Image (tube, rainbow, N blue to C red):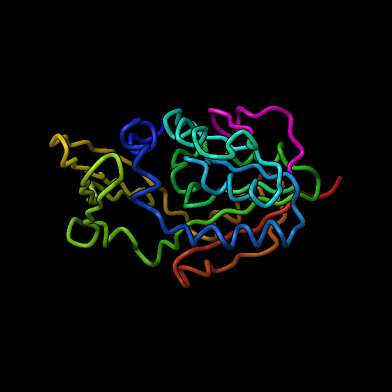
Amino acid sequence: MADDCFAHPRLAALYDPLDADRGDLAPYLRIAREFGARQVLDIGCGTGVFALLLADHGLGVVGVDPAAASLDVARAKPGAARVRWIEGDATDLPPLRADLATMTANVAQAIADPGTWHATLRGARAALRPGGHLVFETRDPARRAWERWTREHSYAHADVPGVGGVESWHEVTDVDGPLVSFRTTFVFASDGAVLTSDSILRFREREEVEADLADHGYVLEDVRDAPDRPGREFVFVARRPEG
């Protein structure tokens, strides 16, 4: 089940205008070039920003996401016909031989259920050609990012074309070990509507992720820093072995 901020049509339409700065995607584009990728699987593609960026650079792209409303936004964008969009997750894929599989924007943390997480790693590996790479990011738990997910620190107001003024903010509702639950509230000035979306993220330790990758037959090549968020994120670069 996708969170309402991705699955509710009215909220999915806000994702891009409320998060217009996607400088976090440039390093992933550089990684695609680094590995000479020609076919990319974008897991948790959402509204298709990264998938379409890849397509703009001539790469073949499959974007998969469980939120139909987000995919509707993606399919309505210019150039969307160049991407193959799939509603589902990494276990719902047709046979692929991708050079690169990605999970950007902390998609990996949103896969909080252990069974679903392991199924995602299996599905991504099956979709990669031998020698292909899986690259994804996750926040460093030691930085305790959730402590600033309060109304005071996260409140924003935006004037969205065709929608009007929208207020939004986050509030943590529970911290249970590695699981952090929070609620995002959206207030629409046009009609006074108040919509909320409840989310759970899993803050995995670096050692846990490394062990999970090894258990699923990946070779860990590197753990990098996120250039746009130095010291706050782990970027894992893993490879499906040859043979």
Residue visible at 45% across and 59% down in the picture: 139
- Left or right of 90 on screen, residue 14: left
Q: Position of residue 17 (x, y in %)?
A: 36, 49
Quadrant containing the N terminus is top left
Q: Judge by depth and name the residue closer to the eye, 175 or 34.
A: 34
Residue visible at 45% across and 38% down in the picture: 113
Magenta residue span: 84-98
Q: Main secondary structure of the magenta part?
A: loop
Residue visible at 66% across and 60% down in the picture: 31
Relative to 199, residue 206 above or below: below
168 magenta-colored: no
Quadrant containing the C terminus is top right
Q: Position of residue 184 (x, y in %)?
A: 26, 45
Q: Judge by depth and name the residue closer to the eye, 119 or 40.
A: 40
Dividing the picture into quadrants, the one containing residue 220 is: bottom right
Q: Position of residue 169 (x, y in %)?
A: 23, 51
Q: Position of residue 21 (x, y in %)?
A: 42, 59
Dividing the picture into quadrants, the one containing residue 15 is: top left
* Residue farthest to the bottom, as pictured: 230
* Residue farthest to the right, as pictured: 243
Q: Judge by depth and name the residue closer to the eye, 124 or 41.
A: 41
Q: How many marks?
A: 0
- Left or right of 145 on screen, residue 33: right
95 magenta-colored: yes
Relative to 69, residue 145 above or below: below
- Left or right of 111 on screen, residue 210: right
Q: Judge by depth and name the residue closer to the eye, 124 or 21.
A: 21
